[in-house]
Amino acid sequence: MTEIPILIGENWLHPEVEQTGPVHNPATGEVIARVPLCGAAEVDQAVAVALQAFAAWGSTPPPKRARVLFRYRELLEVHFEELSRLIATENGKTLDEARGDLRRGVEVVEFACGIAHLAKGENLPRLAEEVDGMTMREPLGVCAGITPFNFPAMVPMWMYPLAIACGNSFVLKPSEKVPLTANRLAELFLEAGLPPGVLNVVHGGREVVDALCIHPGVRAISFVGSSPVARHVYTTACAHGKRVQSAGGAKNVLVVLPDADPEPTVRAIMGSAFGCAGQRCMAGSLLMGVGKAADPLREQLLAAMDKLPLGGPLSDPRTGMGPVIDGKARDRHFAAIVEAPGVGLEVARDGRQGLPEKGFFVGPTLLDRADDQHRVFKEELFGPVLAMLRPSSLDEALACFNQLPFGNAATLFTESGTAARQFSLQVKCGMVGINLGVPAPMALFAFSGWDQSFYGDLHVQGTEGVMFYTRQKTVLSRWAGGFRHFF
Ligand code: NAD
């Protein structure tokens, strides 16, 4: 059984821990490795090494830092297929989805390659008589990232490439369910020439997270995961004086108007609700068929769901949907389907049928006739179970969705510019799609969730990411007198 090491400086270590956790291949249910569940001692070690490394890395000229990122980008391309297969193995998503996961991460590295330009400050000569003003952005010190299981490459790469490009050193705590990809990503960064200690990886669960949130040597925490943990990380790390960006869970809506173009709409809904087995924070988990749109939409969707081939990502190239992450996640979905008829939901398609024999599979499921009182409306299930509502108008759809405490994403399918404009202006969430199933902003824009989908101020990615990982210094200079003599 593979025992997974942690990375402290340039050393891959097997710490002496009381407990290890299983890493599954979700497509077969087999345990493929064991991950050490570290604690405060390993966090202390990692932060000490990161602090040491920061002294030199933080004062390395940004163009020189960028050169390491350019080399890293090339290595990621060379190892693209190998990494994608690793993602698919430990997460269960299809190979194409795994490639997408990695591609979104590589785009952040490409963005971070522009750090010499991105981190430039501003200046204003003659701010006052004989006084010039300028700003500069400086790195913070040791930053830490805590990530979820659903994007083994992309979410860690939302964080450490940009933090490191900005001159910080970093401690990554990946999800204990998908530690293999994180280790390989770190290994390649060292191979690209990153000085040892600038990136460290400590595996584990709550103990590591809590130790990072209270550690006096850590200046900033980036977190992505479920809302209760996001809030816990935000409040704990803020109370310990850290800068925090903490992204939480979601309940994203897909609203379909009667004038929507049926074929691309159904394709986009299938990708959004069932892509990555519904385990994207951008996955549409609420479907609103407005007025006359509802009946034909349901029929077209059911036909498409029946054609979606379930299977292991690496065992069958035709696989359209992989398993959920573990047995606990599968049982949570089965329980929601069992509960449905008793609470007035119609099980239009039951994802417990026709499943592969092994692995943590849940088939695409549609629960029709939901309303704002149902648990499937209010709570994140995080899998391939889509709840369908039937509002009579766009106004009703907006009023219904806007009461949710989450504020992640919403999409409208329509051919009407007026409806699209109303939706963009009135919907209460941070990421909006028009005729787009997954309106993920990619590396150039901030991943801008609201409310219980994000605690903090500056989001990951884009220029907000640069601002999060740097602090501003304003310099005012007075050089009086002298130069009159020269002219
Ligand atoms: P999770 O909250 O269970 O775990 C996330 C991280 O927190 C992991 O590293 C885990 O080890 C740690 N953790 C878990 N419980 C903890 C606790 N009690 N105290 C301290 N740390 C703890 O999330 P998950 O199941 O790995 O990922 C799925 C969730 O992530 C979903 O809710 C999804 O919506 C969310 N997500 C959000 C975004 C976003 O950008 N908003 C992106 C991806 C995933």
Image: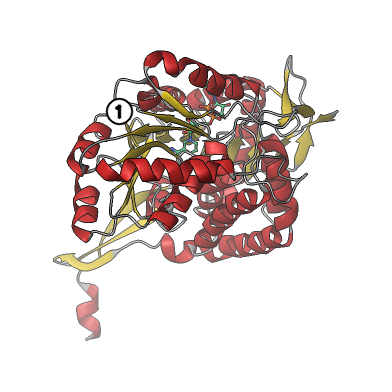
State the quadrant of the N terminus: top right
**Is disc 1 surrounded by few (<14), some (14 to 19) or many (20+) residues within 10 Å?**
some
Mark 1 CB near ligand 1 (8 Å cut) = no
Q: Residue at x 35, y 35 (%)?
A: 456
Res 40 → quadrant: top right
Q: Quadrant of residue 200?
A: top right
As rendered, which of 118 and 425 lies closer to the eye? 425
Residue at x 58% of width, y 60% of height: 65
Indicate the position of residue 193 as horizontal and vertical percent values: 70, 57
Residue 216 in the image: state x and y as whole percent.
49, 27
Give the answer, above or below, for where 478 lies relative to 28: below
Q: Quadrant of residue 477?
A: bottom left
Q: Can residue 386 be seen in this snapshot? A: yes
Residue at x 65% of width, y 22% of height: 327
Left or right of 397 in this view: 254: right
The number of discs equals 1
Residue 430 seen in this snapshot = no
Up-down relation of residue 140 to residue 117 (above or below): above
Q: Relative to 164, is 462 on the left or the right?
A: left
As drawn, is 213 to the left or to the right of 399?
A: right
Question: Which residue in the protein does label 1 denote?
Answer: 405
Q: Is residue 416 above or below residue 432?
A: below
Q: Secondary structure at mark 1?
A: loop
Q: Position of residue 58 (x, y in %)?
A: 53, 51
